[in-house]
Amino acid sequence: MKKILALTSISILLLIGGLYASPFYFLLYGAKMMIETGRDTAFIGDHIYFDNRVVKAADTATDWPKHLAYNRIPLSPKMQELHQQYGSVAHVVIYKDSILHESYYDGYSDQSKSNSFSMSKSFVTSMLGKAIMEGQIESLDQKVSDFLEGFDQGYAAKLTVGDLASMSSGLEWNEKYDLSLNGMMEAYISPDLTRVMKKSIITSPPGEGFRYLSGNTQLLAMVLQEATGKNISDYFSEKFWQPLGATQDALWQLDSAANGMEKAYCCFATNAKDFARMGKLYKDYGQWEGEQLLDSTFIAKSTQARFSESPEYGYGWWMAPYKDQQGFAMRGHLGQYVIVFPESDLIIVRLGHQKGPKKDAFGPQMFHDLIDEGFQMIAHVSQP
């Protein structure tokens, strides 16, 4: 019996060792995460299970003022039901830069941190605009090979930073949260993101069409690190989070490598009203309290579709058409949204556990319902 147990133990150790040395090494970390969290996929509170880098807030924070009609307009029964059905944790409506409505659920408050998921892609693209504005990157047309090794041959030699930002890289990547190599799950749980991204292969001509891939944003973050000489958490804090008067230090999830690489495509944790600050910045075409933080022409380009056959996406931002208005949005896994309508001076934020069924390329049904609710609210305010 002792021999059998010893052989079994040795076999298990050899299996683990072999797995660690194989391309499937990240499965070990996935198993560890599942044991620690009791979950088999990403969730909005997962930042406590990973390493994080602090994104420092302003020394002097600025709170959103409350609208005269603050929380006087009740949510519709339909929206209340949707919040319960899909596990919303925050719903904030900002009209004319004042809080018109805010509600929180599931033990969350206006100070609770929640994972952005892919809303952070809009943050990374904003940093690209800032780096261009400051001359650290020439333009959207500058080649990725000017910053990263291994991108000077074949299709990769044609790849630009704008192609990464507009999801048109031609990158080979699996966007699904399954156990595929060179894809989302490996990037999410890998202890070494640089190791993951070094396997990147551009297999089709870049700049020819939209294909949503998180690997694009991770590569763009690596470009930004090379261009600015700073990790993206510190750069974002200096150029955006502090100037915007954020009330809280945010957290950006890292891999577990020695120097720590941010999961740039996701995993920026903060509260709902601080998320809304980036919406206001874009609503106001880069101005914040009289200072031009981001070039207005870059914002205008980012919030328009690059490809006519894919009208849902620009440069790091999703489009949000509504009746005769053109809005835009940050969108994240499980239904994290900051939705902006500049013409109506309206910002809508929703954070939660589920997003519900898909309606169209512009978003799930709940995304559209949130927009309807927001416009119904401001219509009430406008009535005499």
Image: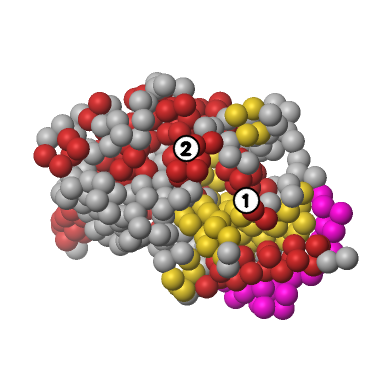
Pinpoint residue 188: horizontal percent, then vertical percent: 37, 50
Let me know if residue 222 appears in the view.
Answer: no
Give the side of residue 108 with respect to residue 145, left or right. Answer: right
> Which corner quadrant of the image does residue 199 belong to?
top left
Q: Amino acid at mark 1?
A: Pro
Which residue appears at 60% of the width and 29% of the height? 292
Q: Identify residue for label 1.
A: 342
Callout 1–callout 2 Cβ contact below 8 Å: no
Q: Quadrant of the N terminus?
A: bottom left
Nearest the viewer among 290 and 339 is 290
Q: Which residue is mark 2?
A: 298
Label 1 vs 2, first from the N-terminus: 2
At x 64%, y 61%, the residue is 89
Q: Label 1's element? A: helix
Image location of residue 155, percent across then percent down? 15, 42
Q: Residues within 10 Å of mark 2 (few under 14, many from 20)?
A: many
Q: Is residue 89 above or below residue 199?
A: below
Q: Is residue 264 visible?
A: yes
Q: Residues within 10 Å of mark 1 (few under 14, many from 20)?
A: some
Looking at the image, what colour scheme do you see?
secondary structure
> Which region is colored magenta?
66-87
